[in-house]
Image (cartoon, rainbow, N blue to C red):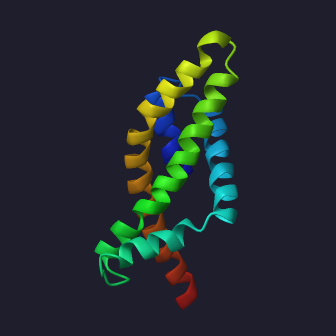
């Protein structure tokens, strides 16, 4: 999921598609997700949100609704932190314009990154469960 998000950020911000750029963003997103996941119970929140609609756990509908909350939480942290790092540590952006660039960059990146993270998280969870079930059966 981090790789997909890194590629999304690269294309949204018109950054060079190089191994260094991909790796930096991928690593940054990985650490953000890792640290947030240790302290924020976003999956429980997603489960409660899906249960509000009386959806049966294990169904596609449940998974699609449940995934909204984790995607909102993780996407918000990723968007605001990655945008801040890209702008506030960029010497090419004049210091006087950095806050405006940050606000504009965060607001324009949030929705496209949310869509990408939502789809990527759904695929990642499905893939992870599929692989885990194969290893458990073995």
Q: Is residue 76 above or below residue 34?
A: above
Residue 34 location, quadrant? bottom right
Q: Residue at the location (52% across, 27% down)?
A: 103
**Place of residue 108 in the rendered image (x, y in percent of width and height, measured from the top left):** 42, 31
Q: Would you say residue 22 is visible in this rendering?
A: no
Q: Residue at the location (54% across, 53% down)?
A: 74
**Place of residue 35 in the rendered image (x, y in percent of width and height, measured from the top left):** 70, 56
Q: Residue at the location (39% across, 41% down)?
A: 111
Q: Is residue 131 left or right of residue 35?
A: left
Q: Residue at the location (60% across, 36% down)?
A: 82
Nearer the observer, 60 or 4: 60
| Count of marks placed on residues | 0
Q: Would you say residue 14 is visible in this rendering?
A: yes
**Place of residue 6 in the rendered image (x, y in percent of width and height, measured from the top left):** 54, 40
Q: Is residue 28 left or right of residue 133?
A: right
Q: Is residue 59 above or below residue 8?
A: below
Nearer the observer, 66 or 4: 66
Q: Is residue 92 left or right of residue 50?
A: right
Q: Is residue 19 left or right of residue 133?
A: right
Q: Is residue 47 above or below residue 88?
A: below
Image quarter in which the C terminus is found: bottom right
**Place of residue 79 in the rendered image (x, y in percent of width and height, measured from the top left):** 53, 40
Q: Find the residue positioned furthest to the bottom.
A: 137
């Amino acid at each position: 999921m981090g790789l997909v998000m890194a590629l999304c950020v690269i294309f949204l911000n018109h950054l060079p598609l190089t191994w260094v750029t991909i790796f930096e963003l991928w690593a940054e997103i990985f650490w953000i997700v890792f640290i947030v996941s240790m302290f924020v119970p976003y999956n429980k929140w997603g489960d409660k949100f899906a249960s509000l609609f009386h959806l049966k756990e294990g169904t596609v509908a449940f998974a699609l609704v449940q995934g909204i909350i984790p995607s909102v939480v993780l996407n918000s942290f990723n968007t605001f932190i990655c945008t801040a790092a890209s702008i506030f540590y960029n010497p090419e952006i004049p210091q006087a314009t950095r806050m405006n660039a940050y606000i504009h960059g965060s607001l324009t990146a949030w929705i496209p990154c949310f869509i990408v993270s939502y789809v990527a998280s759904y695929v990642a969870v499905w893939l992870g469960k599929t692989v885990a079930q194969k290893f458990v059966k073995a």
